[in-house]
Image (tube, rainbow, N blue to C red):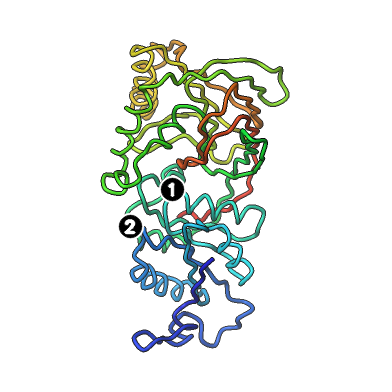
């Protein structure tokens, strides 16, 4: 775990601002809100962030901001817990989807809010909340001058092949099967250089194998059923990069999951899925005329099975790759996902 205080608390020969310059000389310290920035040092320009934070915290009347660095051993959960113990009422997650997920998991059940400073290739939660993706100063302004919005969290209990169990939180979606296998196959160096194009290479390698999985599942308190599928995804919200709307009816604050099972048979099945999620969900659904076209040509696509619920229990015939919020988290033999309604407060534009 690595933490670093604000410049006011750790002066150096090259940077030694006073407490006043960090935003709050003469204020009652017990009455002034303070923020923390949990940042991935590989993905952000800390100097630029500090300058913007300093300006906006002063203008908004916040106290000195503290900075906490993530590491390979701690992607953000432990340092977020430290930030809360230090009195932060808002934590700004500056990093990729892994940083956001780790911070959100640590904030679950607290009174502190989460602000997003998108970095990396996915930015899944920021996309689904229609937040700024590439204007750092606007994102920081939203953190200090925005409003609070309560959103749901997904909580998933994972059973490993050796019987070990663990619980993780997701903010966007969790999936088992081909999508998780694709993420496990993604070359990290290629992803760093070309971003989402790296997934094309991973998809090609994943599709070479037999990817069908057999599962037993129970939705809410219904009967246990069986199904074969390539991928099962449980979503808190449904928009992916490249404007791909995987779960068109998903809402981040409705207290329920949207669930989809992908069950293609050969090239035609994959083509049907692509047309559905890219053309219909991503293009036609966004306009009145497009929705009329969809209504006039409405037909069920057997390769996609949609459902909704507050709890999904899945037991797999064999161990399969599993992902949460775009990060591979190993293999699982069983999963139990439940909604925690309104469990996370996020800062959005006022």
215 with respect to 71 (left or right): right
Estimate how packed mark 2 is, as few (under 14), some (14 to 19) or many (20 or more) residues with alpha carbons within 10 Å. few
Residue located at (39% from left, 74% from top): 55
How far is the residue under mark 1 from the one under mark 2?
12 Å
Q: Is residue 144 visible?
A: no
Residue located at (65% from left, 33% from top): 336
Task: Looking at the picture, tell me which residue is in the foreground, 253 or 110.
Answer: 110
* Circles 1 and 2: CB atoms closer than 8 Å: no
What number is the disc on residue 190? none
Task: Looking at the picture, tell me which residue is in the foreground, 38 or 299.
Answer: 38
Q: How many marks?
A: 2
In terms of secondary structure, where does tag 1 sit?
Answer: helix
Estimate how packed mark 1 is, as few (under 14), some (14 to 19) or many (20 or more) residues with alpha carbons within 10 Å. some
Task: Looking at the picture, tell me which residue is in the foreground, 323 or 295.
Answer: 323
Residue 11, located in which quarter of the rendered image? bottom left
- The residue to which callout 1 is attached is 126
Q: Earlier in the sequence, mark 1 or mark 2?
A: 1
In the image, residue 161 above or below residue 134 = above
- The residue to which callout 2 is attached is 135
């Amino acid at each position: 775990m690595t933490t670093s205080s604000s410049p006011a608390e750790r002066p150096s020969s090259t940077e030694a601002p006073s407490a006043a310059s960090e935003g709050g000389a003469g204020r009652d310290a017990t009455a002034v809100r303070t923020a923390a920035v949990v940042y991935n040092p590989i993905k952000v320009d800390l100097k630029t962030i500090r300058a913007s934070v300093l300006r906006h915290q002063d203008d908004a009347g916040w106290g000195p901001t503290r900075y906490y660095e993530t590491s390979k051993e701690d992607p953000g959960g432990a340092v977020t817990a430290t930030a809360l113990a230090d009195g932060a009422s808002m934590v700004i997650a500056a990093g990729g989807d892994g940083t956001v997920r780790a911070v959100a998991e640590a904030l679950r059940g607290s009174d502190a809010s989460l602000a997003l400073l998108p970095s990396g290739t996915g930015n899944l939660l920021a996309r689904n909340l229609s937040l700024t993706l590439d204007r750092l100063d606007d994102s920081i302004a939203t953190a200090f001058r925005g409003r609070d919005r309560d959103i749901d969290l997904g909580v998933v209990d994972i059973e490993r092949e050796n019987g070990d169990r663990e619980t993780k939180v997701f903010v966007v979606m969790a999936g088992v099967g081909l999508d998780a296998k694709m993420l496990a196959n993604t070359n990290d160096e290629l992803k760093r250089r070309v971003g989402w194009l790296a997934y094309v290479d991973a998809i090609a390698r994943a599709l070479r194998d037999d990817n069908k999985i057999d599962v037993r599942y129970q939705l809410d308190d219904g009967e246990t059923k069986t199904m074969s599928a390539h991928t099962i995804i449980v979503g808190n919200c449904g928009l992916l990069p490249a404007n791909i709307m995987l779960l068109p009816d998903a809402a981040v604050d409705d207290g329920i999951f949207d669930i989809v099972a992908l069950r293609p048979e050969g090239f035609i099945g994959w083509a049907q899925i692509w047309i559905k999620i890219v053309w219909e969900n991503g293009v036609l659904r966004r306009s009145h005329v497009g929705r009329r076209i969809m209504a006039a040509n409405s037909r069920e696509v057997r390769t996609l099975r949609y459902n909704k619920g507050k709890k999904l229990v899945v037991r797999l015939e064999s161990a399969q790759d599993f992902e949460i919020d775009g990060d591979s988290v190993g293999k699982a033999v069983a999963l139990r996902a439940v909604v925690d309604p309104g469990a996370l407060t996020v800062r959005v534009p006022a």
